[in-house]
Amino acid sequence: MTFIGFKKLLLDAEISLPKFSKLIKVSEKNLQSYKKKGRCQTL
């Protein structure tokens, strides 16, 4: 692997990890609000 390819992988990881954690936080908030409303009976 070249240095440029490695640098690109690092950049992709730095961009995708925060997006991924934001998605997880959003889905957790949605689950909690669904449970409070009583719509989350299937899970």
Image (cartoon, grey):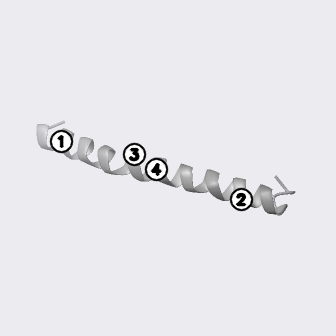
Residue 7 x/y as whole percent: 18, 41
Please name the amino acid that badge 3 sits on: Leu
- Amino acid type, mark 1: Lys
Does 34 appear above or below 15? below
Vertical arrangement, residue 42 with respect to residue 8, above or below: below
For marks 4 and 1, give the CA distance.
20 Å
Placement of 27 over or under 5, stated as above or below:
below
Mark closest to the chain's N terminus, 4 or 1: 1
Q: Are marks 2 and 3 in contact (CB under 8 Å)?
A: no
User: Mark 4 or mark 2: which comes first in sequence?
Assistant: 4
The label number, if any, that marks residue 33 in the structure image: 2
Disc 3 designates what residue? 17
Which residue sits at x=39%, y=45%?
Answer: 17
Task: Report the front residue among 35 and 43.
Answer: 35
Which class describes the residues within 10 Å of circle 2: few (<14), some (14-19), or many (20+)? Answer: few
- From the viewer's perspective, tell me whether residue 5 is left or right of residue 43: left
Horizontal relation, residue 38 to residue 27: left or right:
right
Tell me residue 36's x, y (percent). 79, 57
Local secondary structure at mark 4: helix
Q: Using a 10 Å C-alpha cutoff, classify the residue at mark 4 as few (fewer than 14 neighbours), some (14 to 19) or many (20 or more).
A: few
**Numbered tag placed on residue 20 in the rendering:** 4
- Of the numbered discs 2 and 3, the one sitting upstream in the chain is 3
Crowdedness near tag 3: few (<14), some (14–19) or many (≥20) residues, C-alpha within 10 Å: few
- Of circles 1 and 2, the one toward us is 2
- SS at badge 3: helix
Residue 27 position in % (x across, y down): 61, 55
Query: Dot 1 corresponds to which residue?
Result: 7
Residue 38 image position (x, y, % from top left): 85, 61
Q: Residue at x 19, y 36 (%)?
A: 1
What residue do we see at 71% from left, 53% from top?
32
Q: If you read the primary sequence from the N terminus, does the residue marked by circle 1 or circle 2 appear first?
A: 1
* Marks 4 and 3 in Cβ contact (< 8 Å): yes
